[in-house]
Image: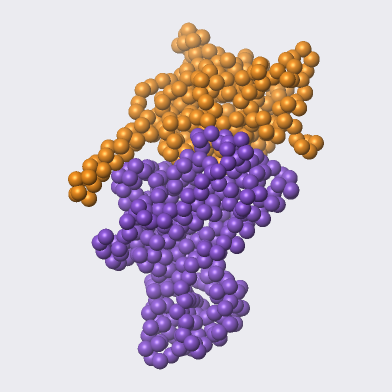
Chain colours: A purple, B orange
């Protein structure tokens, strides 16, 4: 094992390979393209497959098809491409097909600034596809975390049979940091085995826990997959007694899970001010925290890697001990909306920047000290 | 089982037909329908889709394929509802995207026979980009495009195959756009097997489909059909039977077409039925799989010699 200097985007590709990803479909877009380039080079060497599709709609469709064929699958994109993927992300949620979608956020809307960073897709990652659905969204703050969270994204997507979005940004994606890659053979990989025989297999059964096993096509389990509301064997249905149990199960499987919420707390006893952040802005937040402490001011820091579902209990507890939560983010206030929902508007101070520049520690300091 | 849910066993059998108990034995078509599926189909009585579904089943059966080996991937539309009734690995995806889903599936399982089932709008309007790229790659997928000249499911709007001058709910004064020649488009884009027949000619469709499925690369079968309840009604084309008759009267076999004089061919407006195009070209997954094999072997060698 050696320490290497690596880009966030490269670390994502390495994390995918380590997690067992063997199919990648994508369409080039700045600032995510390195993920595709590394995957196209490495996948064949490990017996995996890569394809550059005709657009992002097709890429998203292809990775779902690939997973139905039994290969763990991923795509990576940025703003405009992420917009195009939304319909099929909803399909993956509805049909419960595991897959990982990387969005290296760039400044938007529209073509925006392809090479500038942003955190403007937080709400789109949650609600971008139409209709009510659950989704898991993870957000790294370093190169090392880009690797770790990609592995985690694959494992969560398999465990909960859901699309998982890795929401990184141009800064983390293009930044180089030292990273020590583990031996890929010993990286934990979640696999859910099908224990039923083809005769009693039901791809959407409600009676054996919240996550039924997904059988790959061509293995003797002939069943139906659809984006329509469906019954336990996957056939379209309009019956409320078949729709309701499904709705309850797919919400519950993610809402009640105890291993999805990842966050780090660095609390200081007696602090009345806290900073809550994620992604590239969390690096600024960390810096600001250090500076405040150096000046003898008390401050707590909460950095979250899971954006959705939002770690509301932990944030609620934090709010009980402080008067003010500063939320720096590179958008016009998106995760702040969620923090405000949980702790009330009065305690939340937003620090926003949506012009492609990073938030500076000074901007956070001013808000924290005001 | 509640009242409105029927299984194939409960379907009414007309007089003089094979007794219900013997259906599964007697008919390969029924044998390959899903026994636990809620029948009847969602299709209007008289729709050509049932005939085409029968052809597809017979074609698969004639090749001696195991049902487990076959995957049907459909988009959205009346046509795209076909797979749910059939006892294979089946997937009903999003409008226009069947070929993109099918591409991922075929790459993951290049040993399987993957058939994409699409309407004309599905394959050629919203899915037109995927259609030409799947053909260009010559990926081993059979595209079955049921061309009823309209958007049946949404109620008879004009589609990329609606002839000029015909009416639709969104072309109340007549369609001003020219239609795609579907087979020419596929051939030009790189398909290696292209054939066309109609819902009136199921035995021809059987043959075309079985040849398409056995072709290693990208195949297109255009099954010309009709939608009597929307497009037919708006254009006053009569009943399902009338529209079936039109498929018979307004089509010509390729061999008969070739016997026509040059002038007659130039002015021909009839649908030409037959195998229209065949070519040999490397299939995508075969080529990519051999690349993977080569790179994988190199990598293993490097590792064994301690250079990695
Ligand atoms: C993205 C999207 N746009 C529009 C629709 C609505 N829609 C459903 S089926 C259909 C057209 C169906 O026409 P065709 O593909 O020719 O199939 P047919 O019903 O005629 O067999 C449309 C426009 C949709 N489901 N999804
Ligand atoms: S609407 Fe038209 S295409 Fe659809 S089932 Fe009815 S007749 Fe067939
Ligand atoms: Mg149509």
Q: Is residue B20 among what the camera can see?
A: yes
Residue at (32% x, 39% y) in the render: B292
Residue B45, given in percent of the width and then of the height, sits at 73, 27
Quarter of the figure with residue B282: top left
Residue found 30% across the figure and 63% down from its top: A180
Considering only vertical position in the picture, is A243 above or below B219? below
Image location of residue B283, percent across then percent down: 37, 30
Q: How many labels does the image show?
A: 0
Residue at the image point whose x is 77% and y is 12% from the top: B16
Residue B127 visible in rendering: no
Residue A42 position, x and y percent, is 31, 48
Relative depth, front residue between A83 and B300: B300
B147, above or below A336, in the image: above
| Of residues B169 and A231, the one drawn nearer to the viewer in this rendering | A231
Q: In which quarter of the image is the N terminus of chain A?
A: bottom left
Q: Position of residue A285 (x, y in %)?
A: 42, 77
Q: Quadrant of residue A291?
A: bottom left
Q: Quick check: A22 left or right of B226?
A: left
| Residue closest to the eye, B139 or B248 | B139
Q: Name the residue: 54% across, 28% down.
A: B67
Reply above or below: B239 against B41.
Answer: above
């Amino acid at each position: 094992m050696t320490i290497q200097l690596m880009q966030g985007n490269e670390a994502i590709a390495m994390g995918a390979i380590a997690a067992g990803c063997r199919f990648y479909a994508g369409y080039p877009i700045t600032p995510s393209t390195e993920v595709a380039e590394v995957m196209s080079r490495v996948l064949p060497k490990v017996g995996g497959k890569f394809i550059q599709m005709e657009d992002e709609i097709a890429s998203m469709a292809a990775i779902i098809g690939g997973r139905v064929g039994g290969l763990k699958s991923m795509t990576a994109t940025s703003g405009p491409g992420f917009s195009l993927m939304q319909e099929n992300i909803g399909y993956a949620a509805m049909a419960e097909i595991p897959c990982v979608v990387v969005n290296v956020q760039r400044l938007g809307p529209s073509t925006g600034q392809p090479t500038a960073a942003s955190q403007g897709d937080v709400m789109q990652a949650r609600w971008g596809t139409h209709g009510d659905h659950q989704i898991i969204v993870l957000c790294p703050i370093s190169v090392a975390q880009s690797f770790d969270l990609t592995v985690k994204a694959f494992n969560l997507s398999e465990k909960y049979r859901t699309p998982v979005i890795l929401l990184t940004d141009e800064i983390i994606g293009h930044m180089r940091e030292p990273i020590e890659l583990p031996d890929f053979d010993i990286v934990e990989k979640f696999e859910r085995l099908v224990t039923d025989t083809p005769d009693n297999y039901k791809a959407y059964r409600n009676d054996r826990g919240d996550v039924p096993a997904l059988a790959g096509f061509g293995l003797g389990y002939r069943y139906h997959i659809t984006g329509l509301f469906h019954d336990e064997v996957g056939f379209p249905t309009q019956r409320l007694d078949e729709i309701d149990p499904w709705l309850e199960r797919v919400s519950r499987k993610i809402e009640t899970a105890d291993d999805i919420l990842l966050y780090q707390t660095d609390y200081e006893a007696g602090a009345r001010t806290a900073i809550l952040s994620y992604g590239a802005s969390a690096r600024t937040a960390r810096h600001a925290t250090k500076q405040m402490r150096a000046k003898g001011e008390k401050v707590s820091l909460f950095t979250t890697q899971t954006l959705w579902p939002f770690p509301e209990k932990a944030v609620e507890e934090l709010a009980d001990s402080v008067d003010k939560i500063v939320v720096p983010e590179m958008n016009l206030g998106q995760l702040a909306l969620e923090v405000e929902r949980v702790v009330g508007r009065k305690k939340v101070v937003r620090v926003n920047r949506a012009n492609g520049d990073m938030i500076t520690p000074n901007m956070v300091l001013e808000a924290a000290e005001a | 089982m509640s009242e409105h849910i029927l299984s194939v066993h409960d379907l009414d059998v007309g007089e003089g037909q094979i007794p219900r108990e013997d259906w599964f034995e007697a008919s390969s078509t029924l044998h390959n329908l899903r026994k636990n599926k809620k029948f009847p189909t969602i299709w209007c009585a008289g729709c050509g889709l049932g005939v085409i579904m029968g052809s597809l089943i017979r074609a698969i059966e004639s090749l001696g394929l195991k049902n487990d080996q076959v995957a049907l991937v459909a988009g959205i539309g009346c046509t795209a509802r076909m797979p749910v009734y059939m006892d294979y690995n089946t997937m009903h995806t999003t409008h226009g995207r069947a070929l993109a889903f099918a591409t991922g599936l075929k790459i993951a399982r290049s040993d399987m026979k993957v058939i994409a089932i699409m309407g004309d709008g599905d394959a050629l309007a919203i899915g037109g980009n995927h259609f030409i790229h799947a053909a260009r790659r010559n990926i081993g997928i059979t595209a079955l495009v049921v061309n009823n000249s309209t958007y049946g499911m949404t109620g008879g709007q004009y589609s990329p195959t609606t002839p000029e001058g015909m009416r639709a709910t969104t072309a109340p004064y007549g369609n001003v756009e020219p239609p795609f020649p579907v087979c020419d488009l596929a051939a030009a884009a790189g398909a290696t097997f292209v054939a066309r027949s109609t819902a009136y000619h199921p035995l021809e469709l059987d043959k075309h489909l079985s040849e398409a499925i056995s072709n290693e690369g990208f195949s297109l079968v255009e099954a010309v059909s009709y939608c009597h309840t929307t497009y037919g009604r708006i254009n006053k084309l009569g009943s399902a039977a009338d529209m079936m008759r039109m498929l018979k009267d307004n089509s010509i076999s390729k061999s008969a077409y070739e016997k026509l004089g040059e002038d007659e061919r130039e002015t021909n407006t009839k649908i030409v039925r037959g195998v229209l195009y065949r070519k040999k070209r490397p299939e995508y997954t075969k080529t990519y799989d051999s690349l993977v094999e080569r790179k994988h072997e190199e990598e293993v060698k490097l590792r064994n010699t301690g250079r990695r």
